[in-house]
Image (cartoon, helix red, strand yellow):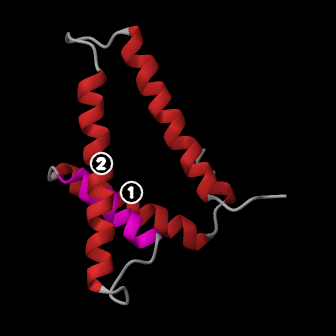
């Protein structure tokens, strides 16, 4: 679950807007995974102060995760042009797993 714009600070709104702009621009260039990496790097403060070797390893890990998910989706989808009920269920499970992970990254709220 993503925070509503109403509950976000101005800084959070600016970061979200920047990430969405970067994502749109890079997706138009066929670089959607790089868009994700760029957004992640911004949110995790991976920048010029980060050791270049560490930044490169983090980027590799990010891309490896994207490659794993993409390859797995290609393997698990049933044959045919239209998604099957089983395909939709599998994708829903992937979505839930990622939402659960995203929620685990947020600080606990009282």
Q: Is residue 99 placed above or below 75 in the rendered structure?
A: below
**Residue positioned most to the left:** 29
In which quadrant will I find the N terminus? top right
Stretch of the chain drawn in magenta: 31-43
Closest to the observer, 92 or 8: 92
Q: Position of residue 108 (x, y in %)?
A: 75, 59
How far apart in space, not on screen, are marks 1 and 2 (Cα)? 18 Å
Instruction: Answer left or right for 7 relative to 27.
Output: right
* Pointer 2 residue: 66
Secondary structure character of the magenta stretch overall: helix
Q: Can the viewer see residue 67 in this picture?
A: yes
> Is 39 contained in the magenta span?
yes
* Residue at point 59%, 58% (across, down): 105
> Is 77 contained in the magenta span?
no
Q: Position of residue 47 (x, y in %)?
A: 35, 82
Q: Which mark is residue 20?
A: 1
Instruction: Answer left or right for 71 relative to 3.
Output: left
């Amino acid at each position: 679950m993503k925070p509503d714009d109403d509950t976000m600070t101005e800084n959070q709104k600016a970061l979200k807007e920047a990430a969405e702009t970067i994502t749109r621009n890079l997706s138009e260039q066929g670089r959607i995974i790089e868009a994700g990496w760029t957004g992640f790097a911004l949110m995790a403060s991976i920048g010029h102060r980060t050791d270049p070797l560490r930044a490169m390893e983090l980027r590799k890990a990010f891309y490896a995760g994207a490659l794993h998910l993409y390859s797995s989706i290609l393997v698990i989808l049933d044959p045919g042009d239209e998604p099957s009920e089983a395909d939709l269920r599998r994708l829903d499970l992937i979505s839930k797993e990622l939402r659960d992970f995203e929620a685990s990254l947020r600080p606990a709220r009282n």
